[in-house]
Image (tube, rainbow, N blue to C red):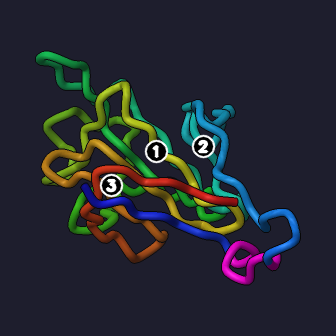
Amino acid sequence: MQRTTFVGDDCKEGAGREQKTACEPSRAGAPANRGLPEVGQYGQVSPSGQWAFYTDENFQQSGDYIYSAAFISDLRSKTSYALTPAGLVKFDPAGNALEALPEGTCMLPGEADPRWLPERDILLVDGCGATPWMVVEPPGRVQAVVADQVAIYR
């Protein structure tokens, strides 16, 4: 089993042997969603407030589970992107049908647990097809991560 740990800058420096640790694992549980009037959805906003991750139930597939399409929105420019393992693809969900999604758009199951890293506009996404985990750093980087378990420290 491979374990991948993402550590913030404060954690890298450490607190010395006699002192309390500089950081602790992030709390388990679902991150808070808030209304995103820019896209008419609820989602997770990045630490800087520029980016938001959301799934759109208007674009669903079903089988053993219900899967919803994953999007990243630039809240400043009001531009949405479909999340794919190959990268972010500019896409306007309004007025489009499921068939119009860019090829490879991540369809996430309800139990997926995507979350922003503390203090950085980097999103960790699990459950996107054959890719166990993805690191998404808008607007450009999307990278697969091979890990059985991921821990985020803050």
Tell me the quadrant of the picture where the N terminus can be found. bottom left
The amino acid marked with disc number 2 is Gln
Mark 2, residue position: 44
Q: Which residue, as the protein is rendered here, is positioned at the far front?
A: 18
Q: Which residue is mark 3?
A: 83
Q: Give left or right: position of 57 versus 118.
A: left
Q: Earlier in the sequence, mark 2 or mark 3?
A: 2
Question: Callout 3 environment at 10 Å: few (<14), some (14 to 19), or many (20+)?
Answer: many
Where residue 85 is drawn, which disc sits there? none
Distance of label 2 from label 1 (alpha carbons): 9 Å
* Label 3 close to label 1 by CB (< 8 Å): no
CA distance separating discs 2 and 3: 14 Å
Q: Position of residue 137 (x, y in %)?
A: 47, 70
Q: CA distance from mark 3 to mark 1?
A: 12 Å
How busy is the neighbourhood of tag 2: few (under 14 within 10 Å), some, or many (20 plus)? many
Q: Which residue is mark 1?
A: 114
Residue contact at pointers 2 and 3, CB within 8 angstroms? no
Q: Amino acid at mark 1?
A: Pro
- Above or below for 86 versus 59: below
Query: Residue drawn 19% across and 53% down?
Result: 102
Element at label 3: strand
Helix, strand or loop status at disc 2: strand
> Mark 3 or mark 1, which is nearer to you?
1
Q: Amino acid at mark 3?
A: Leu
Query: Reading the chain from its start, which is encountered first: label 3 or label 1?
Result: 3
The residue that appears at 60% across and 36% down in the rendered structure is: 28
What secondary structure is found at the residue carrying circle 1?
Answer: loop
**Residue 48 rendering spot, x and y as whole percentages:** 72, 64
The boundaries of the magenta stretch are: 9-16
Residue 45 in the image: x percent, y percent? 64, 49
- Against 22, residue 116 (above or below) is above
Which residue: 37% across, 41% down? Answer: 93
